[in-house]
Image (cartoon, grey):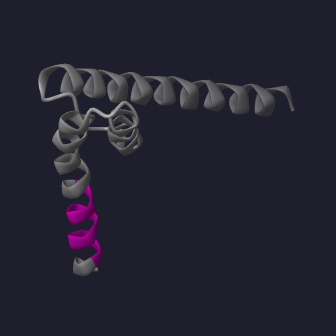
Amino acid sequence: MASLAFEQARQRVGTLDIGALLAAAGGFLDRFTYVGHGHVFANAMTGNVVLPGISCFSRSWKTALHLLPAIFAFVVGVSVSQAMR
């Protein structure tokens, strides 16, 4: 019985390690693309939707328009993938 509980705990720790590794990789990719590629996120579409909203709220229209191609490319990609199904 103790062996089963130990095995389940070990599996959860392995899942946590993998989750932490994936979160770190995603954070690195977001930081890399945000800083080096025009202040857009590659990994989190939520950020790409929030940033134009903030820009519109602060009446920075040029910045908001600069961020729209990333959202448009995402929508086109989703549409193409759905059409291929």
Q: Would residue 38 appear left or right of 44 to someone viewing this image?
A: left
Total tally of numbered discs in the picture? 0
Q: Residue 9, percent across and down?
A: 71, 27
- 66 up-or-down from 77: above or below: above
Q: Residue 42, percent across and down?
A: 25, 38
Q: Would residue 23 appear left or right of 5 to someone viewing this image?
A: left
Residue 81 or 46: which is nearer the viewer? 46
Q: Furthest residue to the left?
A: 37
Q: Residue 83, percent across and down?
A: 24, 80
Residue 65 or 25: which is nearer the viewer? 65
Residue at 12% from the left image edge and 28% from the top image edge: 37
Quadrant assignment for the C terminus? bottom left
Residue at 17% from the left image edge and 49% from the top image edge: 69
- Decide whether residue 77 is among the magenta residues: yes
Quadrant assignment for the N terminus? top right
Quarter of the view holding residue 47: top left
- Decide whether residue 4 is among the magenta residues: no
Region in magenta: 74-82
- 27 up-or-down from 82: above or below: above
Is the stretch drawn in magenta largely helix, strand or loop?
Answer: helix
Residue at 50% from the left image edge and 30% from the top image edge: 19
Quarter of the view holding residue 55: top left
Q: Furthest residue to the front?
A: 59
